Image (cartoon, helix red, strand yellow):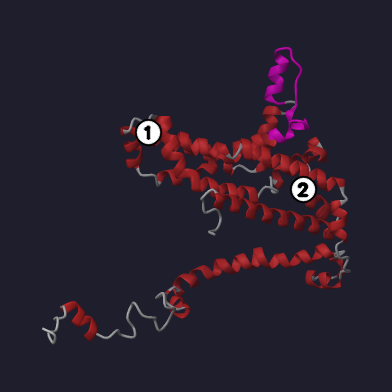
């Protein structure tokens, strides 16, 4: 029939009769954007307790980490701290020299020698030290008995709590000119040796000291990452015929890869800081030619020679280079599919 009508379904009728409310979840929110996120004011009220808890820590970071950055202005001055008892007044009255301190740095052969020693130590520690905590974490994680695992962790952690003075004293008693190794060689008719005063082996000696002192402490992060790996993954790999090495390669290492990438980025950013106290204590034994690094260079020129502007300029150059290394390493981590220090 020409005038016949097709009955509507119940869903269509309800859709036509029911209006969309202004505060519906699909519509724009009154207190925030169209995505439904709460406004900044609502989020502040919701998280005010957490913000108040973190406020003291934020103030400490600002006070001790960011406010001192303003002192880098002395890198562009011939800073004289004796102009006034107040350091701020001394900065305001010190004469400006512009980029003269930076020009002196780039023309100073001692500065480039410290850069070379720093980079060599960084490469050695990256190759010889960085993999050691990973290997130790894998070794401890493979121990079945909890008691044996706890004893191994305690023994490996212990050197971290020793001061560098004690660590160097231990190495001196073992590898020094009158140490245990030299006496053992002399007892068997050989000439004694002193690795503690040999400039050629100093960089390897420093790396060995760092491994012995801090490798055990460095496994904590890796053990925490391994604890989050589901045992079902190991069982599934074993059922597929994977032996222990295959399970480590296909299950354990992929679980550690994000942590390794993060720590590697942080290590690269810390490349120009290779242990101030450790090297300063041994600097006179081997000479500045082998032991001078950027941190000791800044200390020697700033504290000992009282050339504060020159030392501040060297420290500022080091900070800028370190920042660039962090950004480059983080970009490489993003290209490898990892998060790095921060997301894209």
Is 288 drawn above or below residue 303 in the view shown?
above
Coordinates of residue 330 in the picture (x, y in percent): 59, 53
Coordinates of residue 332 in the picture (x, y in percent): 59, 50
At a point 80% along the width and 58% down the height, the residue shown is: 313
Determine which residue is flagged by label 2.
296
Q: Earlier in the sequence, mark 2 or mark 1?
A: 1
Q: Bounds of the magenta span?
A: 179-205
Residue 215 vs residue 305: left or right? left
Marks counted in the figure total 2
Is 25 drawn above or below residue 142 in the view shown?
below
**Label 1 secondary element:** loop
Determine which residue is flagged by label 1.
144
Q: Are the residues flagged by discs 2 and 1 in contact, CB closer than 8 Å?
A: no
Residue 213 vs residue 70: left or right? left
**Residue 203 lies in the magenta-colored region:** yes
Question: Which is nearer the eye, 96 or 180?
Answer: 96
Callout 2 crowding tier (Cα within 10 Å): few <14, some 14–19, many ≥20: many
Does any portion of residue 334 appear in the rendered image? Answer: yes
Mark 2 → mark 1, Cα distance in angstroms: 45 Å
At a point 16% along the width and 80% down the height, the residue shown is: 8
**Label 2 secondary element:** helix
At a point 74% along the width and 54% down the height, the residue shown is: 318
- Can you tell which quarter of the image residue 249 is in? top left
Of the 4 image quadrants, the one containing the C terminus is bottom right
- Can you tell which quarter of the image residue 58 is in? bottom right
């Amino acid at each position: 029939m020409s005038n016949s009508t097709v009955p509507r379904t119940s869903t269509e009728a309800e859709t036509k009769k029911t209006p969309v409310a202004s505060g519906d979840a699909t519509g724009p929110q009154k207190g925030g954007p169209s995505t439904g996120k709460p406004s900044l004011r609502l989020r502040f009220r919701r998280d005010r307790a957490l913000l108040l808890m973190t406020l003291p820590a934020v103030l400490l970071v600002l006070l001790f980490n960011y406010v001192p950055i303003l002192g880098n202005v002395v890198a562009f001055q011939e800073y004289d701290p004796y102009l006034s008892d107040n350091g701020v007044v001394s900065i305001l009255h010190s004469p400006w020299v512009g980029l003269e301190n930076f020009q002196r740095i780039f023309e100073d052969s001692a500065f480039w020698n410290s850069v070379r020693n720093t980079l060599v130590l960084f490469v050695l520690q990256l190759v010889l030290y960085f993999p050691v905590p990973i290997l130790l974490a894998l070794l401890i994680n493979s121990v079945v008995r909890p008691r044996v695992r706890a004893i191994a962790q305690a023994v490996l952690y212990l050197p971290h709590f020793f001061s560098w003075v004690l660590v160097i004293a231990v190495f001196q008693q073992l590898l020094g000119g009158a140490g245990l190794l030299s006496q053992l060689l002399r007892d068997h008719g050989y000439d004694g040796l002193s690795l503690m005063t040999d400039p050629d082996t100093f960089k390897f000696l420093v790396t060995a000291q760092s491994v012995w002192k801090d490798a055990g402490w460095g496994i904590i992060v890796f053990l925490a990452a391994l604890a989050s790996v589901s045992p079902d993954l190991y069982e599934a790999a074993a059922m597929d015929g994977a032996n222990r090495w295959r399970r480590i390669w296909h299950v354990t290492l992929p679980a550690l890869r994000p942590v390794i990438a993060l720590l590697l980025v942080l290590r690269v950013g810390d490349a120009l800081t290779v242990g101030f106290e450790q090297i300063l204590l041994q600097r006179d034994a081997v000479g500045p030619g082998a032991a001078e690094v950027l941190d000791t260079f800044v200390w020697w020129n700033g504290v000992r020679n009282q050339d504060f502007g020159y030392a501040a300029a060297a420290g500022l150059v080091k900070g800028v280079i370190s920042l660039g290394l962090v950004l480059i390493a983080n970009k490489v981590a993003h290209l490898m599919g990892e998060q790095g220090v921060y997301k894209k």
